Image: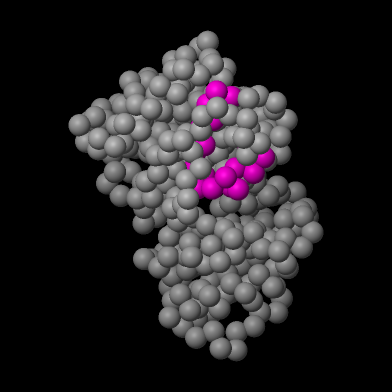
Amino acid sequence: MGMCKEALSPDLVNDYQRILKFIEDASCIAISGHTSPDGDALGSVLGLGMALVERYPKKDVVFLLADRGCVPRIYQFMAGSERFVCAADTACAPDLFISVDSPTLERLADSVQVVERSRNVVCFDHHPAREEFADVCVRRPAAAATAVLIEEFLAWAGIPCNKSTATSLLCGLMTDTGRFQYQNADPAAFACAARLVDAGADPSLIALEVYQSQRLEYLKLESLVMSRIHTVAHGRVAYSYAYASDLTFYGVTADECDGLVDVVRSVRGVEVCLFVKETECCHKVRGNLRSKCDLDVSGIAARFGGGGHAAAAGFTYEGSIVETLNDALPMLCELVGESAAGLHVEL
């Protein structure tokens, strides 16, 4: 794929050498992304996993979902997606566990029990982390996506990247950069995309499956979320919401809702935004934060036990939608330098 080995630091080369030895010495390898996996987590698991399956056909490579459920519909086009199994349902004790796109063990959810049975643990990630949990960790918060790190490692190791593998990695990169619209779409991201397309990745297929194949039911829910958008802080902060009953009424699953925050983000003049939705769990809300500028929303997510990047972060809140909004919106107002005095949401 044309990656220049000389560009890598000695420390990174040493990490890659250790990881490659772990891979070559392992009979069983388990790979997992974080809970509620997005395009980068799934694309990185599949890109790395299928490349290893092709290179080492005698090894047992297990693709794990960190929680119960299935691969979201919009990502099922990626080669190997049918190979995923729920971590809670597997008894494997891998020689090597590879975590992708997860900054903490907690974010690995049910896959943690597989980590605990593993002989060696490796991590590829682009999120900031409080502490490391792997024997070898390749962490680069400046990278646009974890898929960028996987592409780099495969190229360094001389592990072939065929058309389907390249498409999975490009899906991870495209989704984590918002189709190259977010602030993290830097020159390195475009260079990586170019290498992946050169290797056979199909960007038009990704665009069709992920962004242009929404069910009518989802579009009706999106219209409802759009109608509920409100702004505060003189139009600099926007928010909207969806109840669990809304998803039930329209026949939409929770894994289809990742793109709803971008509807809120699209309001002109808005600098940061929040979309919240009730989960099926009683009195629990999932919040998604986005920034359209250089303001960092990850700190607000962290205050609720979540995390992410400066421009995109998320959290889970124990409470109602109204309680979530009344706790989070003042923080967002403060972030943009506006007063939250008198702010109180009643739905």
Quarter of the picture holding the N terminus: top left
Identity of the residue drawn at 43% across and 53% down: 128
The correct choice, above or below, for 142 with respect to 45 in the image is: below
Q: Per the image, is 105 magenta?
A: yes
The correct choice, above or below, for 281 with respect to 108 in the image is: below
Q: How many marks?
A: 0
The residue furthest bottom is 342
Quarter of the picture holding the C terminus: bottom right
Identity of the residue drawn at 59% across and 72% down: 328
What percent of the width, then of the height, locates residue 187?
A: 27, 46
Q: According to the image, what is the colour scheme of the structure?
A: one colour
What percent of the width, then of the height, locates residue 346?
A: 70, 79
What percent of the width, then of the height, locates residue 3?
A: 26, 30
Q: Quadrant of residue 5?
A: top left
**The one of 329 and 21 positioned closer to us in this rendering:** 21
**The one of 15 and 290 positioned closer to us in this rendering:** 15
The residue furthest top is 58
Tell me if residue 99 can be seen. yes
The residue furthest left is 6
What percent of the width, then of the height, locates residue 244?
A: 75, 58
Is residue 198 found left or right of 58 in the rendered image? left
**The one of 297 and 206 positioned closer to us in this rendering:** 297
Tell me if residue 73 can be seen. no
The correct choice, above or below, for 94 with respect to 277 in the image is: above
Identity of the residue drawn at 47% across and 14% down: 56
Is residue 164 found left or right of 110 in the rendered image? left
Q: Per the image, is 221 magenta?
A: no
Magenta residues (range): 94-111
Identity of the residue drawn at 66% across and 63% down: 317
